Image: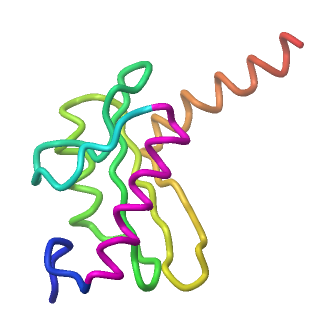
Amino acid sequence: MMSRMSLPPNRSKQWKAWEREVARDLGGTRTGPRGFDVPDVVDLPGDFSPECKYQKRLSLKDADLKQAEHNARKREWALFLREARSGRRFVVVPYKTFLKMWDAYTQGETNE
């Protein structure tokens, strides 16, 4: 199994582009491949830690979830997934994080 660091050049460009896109969309900075202890995006408002995965076929892997949680160091975290061929994008968050987001969303609706 190839690690992210040993991907063919084209795939390497694609996952880097995915990390840049997430960083840009969230208003943060891409950290680049610095290993297992750093989130993929930093300098974000709030206390949030994104982990980005570019995959040939979408799959939710336990190792990716563990990496996202570990790199977050007790902050809120999310796993940003993108499928290569289709370009489909998904974000996976812990249930308690989703409930916080849901509360903020529904409070916004009732205040309008």
**Residues in magenta?**
9-27
Residue beneath the point at 25% across and 43% down: 31
Q: Does residue 1 sit above or below 66 in this rendering?
A: below
Q: Quadrant of residue 75?
A: top left
Q: Which of these two is toward me, 57 or 23?
A: 23
Of 7 and 52, the residue lying toward us: 7
Q: Is residue 8 above or below residue 111?
A: below
Numbered disc total: 0
Is 40 or 10 nearer to us in this picture? Answer: 10
Which residue of the protein is positioned furthest toward the top in this rendering? 111
The image quarter containing residue 69 is top left
Report the side of 42 relative to 45 (left or right): left
Q: Residue at x 34, y 80 (%)?
A: 11
Measuring from the top left, give residue 109's x and y in whole percent.
83, 22
Per the image, is 38 magenta? no
The residue at the point 14 percent across, 80 percent down is 6
Left or right: where does residue 84 sit relative to residue 19? right
Q: Position of residue 9 (x, y in %)?
A: 27, 81
Give the position of the N terminus as an image quadrant: bottom left
| Percent coordinates x, y for residue 85 in the rendering | 54, 85
For the C terminus, give its image quadrant.
Answer: top right
Residue 16 shown left or right of residue 26 in the figure: left
Q: What secondary structure is the magenta-colored segment mainly?
A: helix
Please name the residue shown 47% across and 43% down the image: 95
Q: Is residue 17 magenta?
A: yes
In the displayed structure image, the side of residue 72 where residue 21 appears, left or right: right
